[in-house]
Amino acid sequence: MEKNILPIKKAVLIFFVFACGYFISALLRAITATLSPLLTSEFDLTAGDLGLLAGGYFLGFASMQIPLGYLLDRHGPKKVVSSFLLIAIIGTGAFALAQSFSGLLISRILIGIGVSACLMGPLTGYRIWFADEYQQRANAWMLMVLSMGFVFSTLPVQLLLPIIGWRWIFGLIVILIFFVIFLTFLLIPSWKIENKNHENKVGSLSDIWKNKFFRSTIPLGLFNYGGMVAIQTLWAGPWMVRVSGYSPLESATGLFWINTIMLIAFFIFGYILPKITKLGLESMRLIKIGLPISYLSLLVIIISGENAGAAHFTFYLLTSIVLTLTQPAVALSFPTSLAGKSLTSFNLLIFVGTFIMQWGIGLVIDLSQFFGKGEIQSFQISFFVYLLICIFSYLYFLLNNRNE
């Protein structure tokens, strides 16, 4: 599939439309962290239930990644993103009307399916429409939009709760999804017209999974990246409430500032990445140097226990930002004809991993309490298990990329 670099004004407009969709995806992903005290009380949820509920989004999301790769390579972002968002409307509406835990869980899975193309669709399009040197910037700035969605899922949602309630918040999100579908139909270029001579020149999915570099990133994507997302979108909130002693409002405020700082960080990171690359600091070197720092910051959280608050989690996430380089690095290691399949294959790792880690962290907390550990110690044990898994994932990556 050939590159078709777009003029800057057209590229900015396309980025804006896709950013709107990804903003909603991020808002729906992270909103359970803010709503966790309310949902726990209203539906009598355990830590495992809460982890499973939040992870249901990622289960639905992950289940679509492989078919999504084929669909994106053949039909392009315009058709795929708009079609999947119709499912998101159904899931979001169902969540607003749910009366039981099972209803909430099924709705979250549908939401995950519905927004599963909101990042992969844009990144597949950018692989064709944007120059190679701007792929990492586009990825970082989409993650900036992700953080913006996370920001709005915190304090703004907390302030809206006593006014309209959590069910009507989801009703408003349904309206926003309709608006994004309209913009997508109106402004995103047609894939078939631009690539009509290349439809049959797509590679096999096995080309991705047999690739040595891709295989070396599997543990990082599953456990390290997935766990980082699990902490940012769920477990940072319960830690601040149940370990650090924050009130729900204080926790929401903490999450608001965490994600606001991450938003700024992704903007700066995306801006300087092309300049850093020109100076010889390639993605591989940044990943190898940066990840041990993030592990040390996570260890500080674990040791600090009840003294670890929003500032600690902010530093952990900032030092983990180098993990985001793995996705564009994977995409750039394959030809453009495999853009959709390579991106969605790695995204599958991230979201399966996020589901495993969100649920797994909750299960280890429950298990530790079952064996008589206190709540604070149970959180520390669970996070320490996650840290050990991250270290082994990093070592596997290093051993398979010693000469890079």
Image (tube, rainbow, N blue to C red):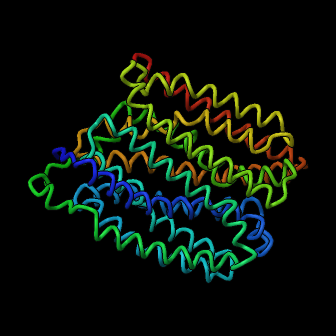
Q: Is residue 254 above or below residue 381?
A: below
Q: Residue at x 43, y 63 (%)?
A: 21
Image quadrant in which you'd find residue 302: top right
Closer to us: 59 or 180 = 180
Residue lying at 61% horizontally and 32% vertically, measured from the top left:
319
Q: In the displayed image of the protein, which residue is found farthest to the left?
A: 197
Which is more toward the observer, 47 or 197? 197
Left or right of residue 374, residue 212 in this image: left
In the rendering, at what x and y percent does residue 112 appear? 50, 64
The structure residue drawn at horizontal position 57% and vertical position 60%, both measured from the top left corner, is 29
Tell how many labels: 0
Q: Position of residue 74 (x, y in %)?
A: 22, 58
Q: Is residue 2 left or right of residue 20?
A: left
Q: Nearer the viewer, residue 280 or 113?
A: 280
Residue 401 drawn above or below residue 303: above
Image quadrant in which you'd find residue 99: bottom right
Residue 136 location in percent, x, y? 39, 38
| Residue farthest toward the front in the current orientation of the protein | 9
Residue at 37% x, 61% y is 17
Is residue 132 or residue 120 the one in the foreground? 132
Compared to residue 264, the image places residue 113 above or below, namely: below
Residue lying at the far top of the rendered structure: 403
| The C terminus, quarter of image | top left
Asked if residue 384 lies left or right of residue 82, the reply is right
